[in-house]
Amino acid sequence: MQFRHPKHDLFVPDGGDPWTALRKVTHLGIVSHQDDLEIAAYHGITECFHNNDRWFGGVVVTDGAGSPRKGHYALYTDEEMQEVRKKEQRKAAYVGEYSVMVQLGYPSREVKLPDAEPVVQDLRFILEHAQPEVVYLHNPCDRHDTHVATFLRCLEALRSLPLEMRPRKVLGCEVWRKLDWLLADDKEMLSVDQHPHLLRPLLGVFDSQIAGGKRYDLAEEGLRHANATYFDSHTTDETSLLTFAMDLTPLTQDDTLDPTEFAVGFVERLAEDVRSRMQRFR
């Protein structure tokens, strides 16, 4: 199994055959950076954990060279940080019992190119052979440039597949722009309280981030509790841990939909909701 960038890394946590590991994936997360999976696609990880009928597969597109560094890692070069991040992502895949973990190794600048054909072809290869039921992506309203570019490359790869080979559900998930602002009808509510103990060890293996002053492990746990409590003011909580996503499936079922207009539609519906609520009470 070969990918186009020389820095790619393929890891099968149980040591099994890579083809078998890829083909049994039912829930696939495709993200930009190491540790994005454990934030954005955490629902898929928990859905598959200790479940012999469901298997999570992870794809990280970029090399992690631009990671902030501090303390023990302050003097690490980009090359050294890439190796650290690769090993951390492997550790997370082992802790989360992923079926397969693929790190494609592209620099961010290559992913941002509109004609990033090698990236798209690698993603198509993975999607074609895994044929997952559910795919977790960055949401198109994310405020990180590489995340948005990765979403677009993923959409190109998905649209290159025949309709019958595309996943039944595609979700745009939270990382650098949270999705609590979505209208209730636009929210996909993903309960993630099946294995409440799993989040901290998954994110805890990313020592280079935590030591660098980013306590994603604490922040993400707090956010999920907050989502569950603040989701609705007039009902009692039905789950203790909740994450939000937007349903991107229409973009993969109708290739004529413009992804920019689709994303802006969520914002416009929010604007109309704010406008109408204000006008009712003036």
Image (tube, grey):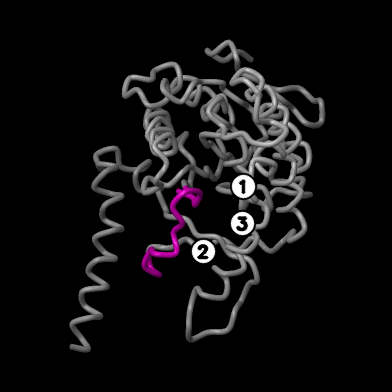
Of the image marks 3 and 1, the number of the one nearer the N terminus: 1
> Which residue is under mark 1?
214
Q: Position of residue 227 (x, y in %)?
A: 54, 68
| Disc 1 secondary structure class | loop
Q: Residues in magenta?
A: 171-185
> Which residue is under mark 2?
189
Left or right position of 75 against 188: right
Q: Residue at x 22, y 89 (%)?
A: 281
Q: What's the residue type where badge 3 is placed? A: Glu
Q: Residue at x 65, y 51 (%)?
A: 215
| Disc 3 secondary structure class | helix
**Residue 140, magenta (yes or no):** no
Name the quadrant of the C terminus: bottom left
The nearer-to-camera label among 2 and 3 is 3
Label ID, residue 220: 3
> Mostly what secondary structure, the magenta segment?
loop
Query: How many numbered marks have been drawn onto this rendered protein structure?
Result: 3
Q: Residue furthest right?
A: 15
| Disc 2 secondary structure class | strand
Q: Position of residue 244 (x, y in %)?
A: 50, 60
Q: What's the residue type where badge 2 is placed? A: Met
Local crowd size for mark 1, using a 10 Å CA cut-off: few (<14), some (14–19), many (≥20): some
Task: Give above or below for 223 relative to 32.
Answer: below
Of the image marks 2 and 3, the number of the one nearer the N terminus: 2
Local crowd size for mark 3, using a 10 Å CA cut-off: few (<14), some (14–19), many (≥20): some
